[in-house]
Image: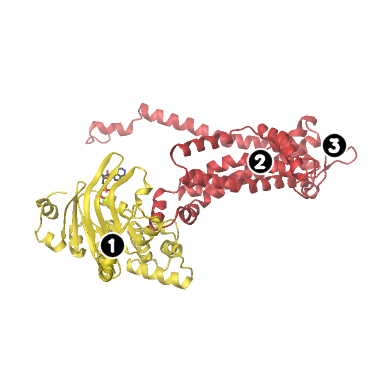
Chain colours: A red, B yellow
Amino acid sequence: MNQDNPTMPDKAAAFDQRDRDWYIDKAVQAIVFLGGISAILFIIGIFVFITKEGLGFLLRDFSFSEFFLSPWWEPTDEDEPTYGILALVAGTASVTGLAMLVAIPFSLGAAIYVGEFATGKKREYLKVLVELLAAIPSVVWGFIGLSIMNPLIIELFDVPVGLNVLNAGVILGLMAAPIMTSIAEDALKAVPDRYREAAEALGATRWQVIFKTVVPAAKNGLLGAVLLGVGRGFGETMAVLMATGHAINLPGSVFDSVRALTATIAAELGETAVGSPHYEALFTIGIFLFVVTFIINLSADLIVRGVRNQ
Amino acid sequence: MVSTAENMETTAVQETPKLKVSNLAISYGDTTVLKDINLEVKTNEIFGIIGPANSGKTSFLKVLNRMDTFNSNMSFEGDAFFNGLNTRDLRNLYALRSRVGVVFPLPVGLPLTIYENVALSPRLRGVKSKEDLDIIVERCLMRAALWDEVKDRLNSLGSLLSGGQQQRLTIARALSQEPELLMLDEFSIAVDPVTTMRIEDVLKELKQEMTIILVTNLVQQARRLADRTAFFLNGECVEIGDTEELFTGNVKDERTIGYIEGKFG
Ligand SMILES: Nc1ncnc2c1ncn2[C@@H]1O[C@H](COP(=O)(O)OP(=O)(O)OP(=O)(O)O)[C@@H](O)[C@H]1O
Ligand SMILES: [Mg+2]
């Protein structure tokens, strides 16, 4: 370098030399990149795996109209097995729908209280408590559904079984509410205090400030919270298996027992021969679940991200 | 107050100052940042407050419309009377704040449309009809010298305007309250000189309709606008006097002259 350009002072040569810091920087970048990319690899890997396992069914026995429109899930029928998931989709959808009816008012209310009204110690305790609730394993919720909700529903509504849409929906709603609260509260907290002060300085009451300024500003984050809750409900297995009654049914009321997509896979996969049509059909359900939850979570994430970037 | 009103029924209304502050001291935690403030602001005057950074001007304004409640750390002693009512004892602070317009030095465009930013306060006090709101929005934006720049995009977000435009948006929003008292805190900090002059002209007109407290770092702005001016320094009110008197050197405290002439600050 110095020979090419003799007028350049010696120090300038440093611009053209890679020192230890430079290599460390590159190495760290590479490691972090691997960490980041591995998430993508795992997702692709899982997708490839379940697709491979379900492919035989998709190519051989799969009929679109039977799979999505028939309410008969009878994969073990000796003469003529049918693979219709309509009843299972209805089961999952009804439970998730009811769960959202329970969870949305609960979680948004809790988020508004924790984020906007609670102060100091009370707020910190409440936040820890919400995080704790979110960490309760789903089998515990399932147990609550079986041993508390079940007799309660039988007694209150005078129905023969208490394991039904109502039971699972309430359990799932209570289960999804903490995580939704947590995300909704983040969204409210992302609204800068200066907006609240500016609105309050206009003479708006706390309530008016929240509904006319804070909630509109946080609406994407709140929507994202709801969508993540839906995704959670859709993918939940254990609690749903325990609380729905696990009976194939197109539900006519909240007191009907139903069966969920996820619970079907969990309950039946262990009893099928690897590679059998039944086994492959279960994986096809897996593909369907994967695609749906992927879309729900992705849109939730994009919506929440949209807020942050504003 | 009550006894004065009874004794002199006719004159009492005129003589009650818009604002009366007695023995006011303001603290953040244990630190007192302003003390021994005694002053009166008359109805329909422009009252200027000048003083170097940290002298407590912004804190003073915050106490006047009880924004001290936003900050659990902030407290005040002494009293401030608005229309003769002690702001400490008011049972509805929201009503007080809706009668007092404030413009902060750092503009805060609410994350609503430009139109909604200005229509919010009228809506809160119950104006519903679209025509009435349209008229209010246009008039306030005109007065804040912003109408021409935004009239074609009233439905875009107010928080995306430039700094100076947001500043004028907050002025329009304060005017939309139809306040009895308008408090401006260094409103021209982000506004170009030409627009500043336009707003100053509007303020002179607004004096007919409301009382104005003008906190400013530009001493010449105080001279152009204020009827009387107070000089705050390091948490004390050094001097209050007729603006023209102060600027012609007729002062009680030499430090006032020093500040006005730019010797420190
Ligand atoms: N939120 C707060 N918490 C703690 N101290 C504060 C707070 N706001 C202001 N102070 C202190 O109060 C004092 C007065 O501040 P204030 O903002 O009232 O001054 P000012 O006269 O408006 O200054 P400037 O001309 O720079 O705006 C300062 O020493 C400041 O550090
Ligand atoms: Mg200030």
Report the residue at 65% width, 34% height from top. A138
Q: Amino acid at mark 2?
A: Leu
Q: Amino acid at mark 1?
A: Ser
Disc 1 marks which residue? Answer: B3
Foreground pick, A60 / B153: B153
The answer to whether residue B77 shows anywhere in this view is: yes
Report the residue at 48% width, 44% height from top. A115
Q: Which mark is residue B26?
A: none
Q: Which mark is residue A76?
A: 3
Dot 3 and dot 1 within a common chain = no
Q: Which mark is residue A172?
A: 2
Report the residue at 31% width, 34% height from top. A15
In this picture, residue B42 sits left or right of residue B161: left
Is A284 placed above or below B59 here?
above
- What kind of element bears circle 3? loop
Cα separation, mark 3 vs mark 1, equals: 95 Å
Q: Nearer the viewer, mark 3 or mark 1?
A: 1
